Image: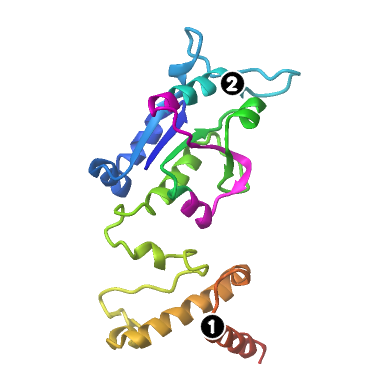
């Protein structure tokens, strides 16, 4: 998989993707993540990537020319490949685990970091394939948002994580919040690990974990239960929890 991030601050991107799990995945050749400097595609000697908006108003707008030229050059470098072109913008579709899985199935993704007052509308209309938001708030630039998306996507690529099965059991992957985790010591200042986790009985442990995930989701994110894949046993357990709360 290859991800190219178009930005005016490539050093910000490189500082993060060169470290930890992403850095190891790059060094092993499992994924390619590259920060591409938009200023390299500017048409003037000042390497300008923004300009004042037509019609007046505050702030600056990202120009068409550098963005289109950058995308065209990147696609040509990959023999005309047709990537998903993602614009990070607070007006976009809310990023979630489902979208991370969707993008992780792609071979080639270009992420454009929005900046200033936004981008020229022609970029939205004629270039990008997806507009994505990480939440209902405004950042000074799309770099942090692009890194959030990159991190969430890359860790789903086979071979990136040490334990191939671990993404399946994380929060949101099953449609539920994740169950609690414990490690040594078994007793810390009188706070003990639940006995079932020390029992060695894997069936009991799996049942406990499922019930804990259901309980935590009901308490903290009940909206997730509307779309989570639930068994009849799950539904009975949730009904018992709700009835116990009533009484």
Q: Is residue 120 above or below residue 48?
A: below
Q: Which residues, given as a range, are shown in magenta? A: 74-102
Q: Quadrant of residue 179?
A: bottom left
Q: Which residue is mark 1?
A: 234
Say few, some or many: other residues with alpha carbon within 10 Å of mark 1 (under 14 / 14 to 19 / 20 or more).
some
Q: Residue at x 31, y 52 (%)?
A: 160
The quarter holding residue 16 reads: top left
Image point (61%, 71%), residue name: 222
> In this view of the protein, which residue sits in the foreground, 10 or 226?
226
Residue 1 pos. (x, y %) = 37, 43
- Give the percent coordinates (x, y) of residue 26: 28, 41
Quarter the C terminus occupies: bottom right
Q: Disc 2 on helix, strand or loop?
A: helix
Q: Is residue 24 left or right of 168 when viewed as pictured?
A: left
Mark 2 closeness class: few <14, some 14–19, many ≥20 residues within 10 Å: some
The residue that disc 2 covers is 64
């Amino acid at each position: 998989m290859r991800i190219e991030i178009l930005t005016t601050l490539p050093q910000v991107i490189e500082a993060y993707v060169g470290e930890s799990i992403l850095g190891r995945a790059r060094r092993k050749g499992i994924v390619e993540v590259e920060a591409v400097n938009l200023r390299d595609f500017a048409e003037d000697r000042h390497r300008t990537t923004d300009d004042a908006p037509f019609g007046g108003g505050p702030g600056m707008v990202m120009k068409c020319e550098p963005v289109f030229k950058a995308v065209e050059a990147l696609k040509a470098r990959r023999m005309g490949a047709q990537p998903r072109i993602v614009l990070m913008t607070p007006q976009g579709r809310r990023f979630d685990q489902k979208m991370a899985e969707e993008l992780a199935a792609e071979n080639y993704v270009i992420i454009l970091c929005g900046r200033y007052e936004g981008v020229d509308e022609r970029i939205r209309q004629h270039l990008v394939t997806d507009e994505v938001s990480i939440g209902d708030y405004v950042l000074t630039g799309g770099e942090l948002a692009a890194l959030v998306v990159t991190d969430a996507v890359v860790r789903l690529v086979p071979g990136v994580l040490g334990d191939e099965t671990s993404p399946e059991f994380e929060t949101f992957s099953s449609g539920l919040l994740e169950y609690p985790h414990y490690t040594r010591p078994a007793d810390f200042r009188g706070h003990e690990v639940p006995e079932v986790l020390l029992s060695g009985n894997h069936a009991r442990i799996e049942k406990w974990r499922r019930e804990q995930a259901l309980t935590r989701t009901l308490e903290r994110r009940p909206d997730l239960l509307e779309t989570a894949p639930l068994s009849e046993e799950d539904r009975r357990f949730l009904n018992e929890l709700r009835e116990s709360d009533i009484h």
